[in-house]
Image: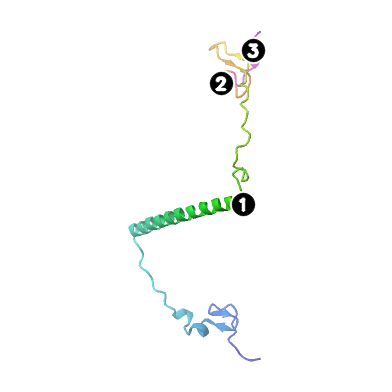
Amino acid sequence: MSQSHFVLNSPSTIRGDLYWSDLTGVEPSRVYYPRTPMSSYKELLAQREKLEKQIEEAKAKEFAEVVNDIKQKMADYGITLADLGFGRGKLAKAGRPRAGVAPKYRDPASGSTWSGRGKPPKWIAGKNRDQYLIQQ
């Protein structure tokens, strides 16, 4: 078996038998990556503002193109808004107004009433409700 450049799990190998330096002529540890100076906060904000403006311009341009493309395809195939589910469906009927429920309990001290539905008011909560029943 011949001796080759075979090193497993080595960071300098690309394939088991192929070294980075074989391709580039430079050892990985000798590669120089120039460091850029850290931008200031205000410079970064200015860059972000410029990018956001470019994004909005690109979006507006592409939006118009997409809308025109959709309109053209709808015309070519005879597609309507109703076909896409945007047509007017049946409008909901206005229900008849509900009649109020007659009060079932009355507070003798204040005259407040309660129908017995929903959360009980403080004057009846936790007490025997029989003493507050409205006699009819």
Q: Which residue is mark 3?
A: 133
Placement of 36 over or under 111, stated as above or below: below
Residues 51 and 29: in front is 51
Which one is closest to the eye, mark 3 or mark 1? 1
Q: Which residue is mark 1?
A: 77
Query: Residue 52: where, in percent of width, then height?
Result: 41, 55
Label 3 element class: loop
Q: Amino acid at mark 1?
A: Tyr
Q: CA distance from mark 3 to mark 1?
A: 69 Å
Cα gap from disc 1 to disc 2, whole angstroms: 65 Å
Q: Mark 2 is on which residue type?
A: Lys
Is residue 28 in the magenta section? no
Label 2: few (<14), some or many (≥20) within 10 Å? few
Q: Are marks 1 and 2 in contact (CB under 8 Å)?
A: no
Q: Earlier in the sequence, mark 3 or mark 1?
A: 1
Percent coordinates x, y for residue 16 in the rendering = 60, 81
Find disc 2 in the rendering and name its residue: 122
Q: Residue at x 57, y 83 (%)?
A: 18
Residue 119 position in % (x across, y down): 60, 24
Q: Identify which amino acid the numbered label 3 is placed on.
A: Leu
Instruction: Say which quadrant the N terminus sits in.
Output: bottom right
The residue stretch that appears in magenta: 124-136
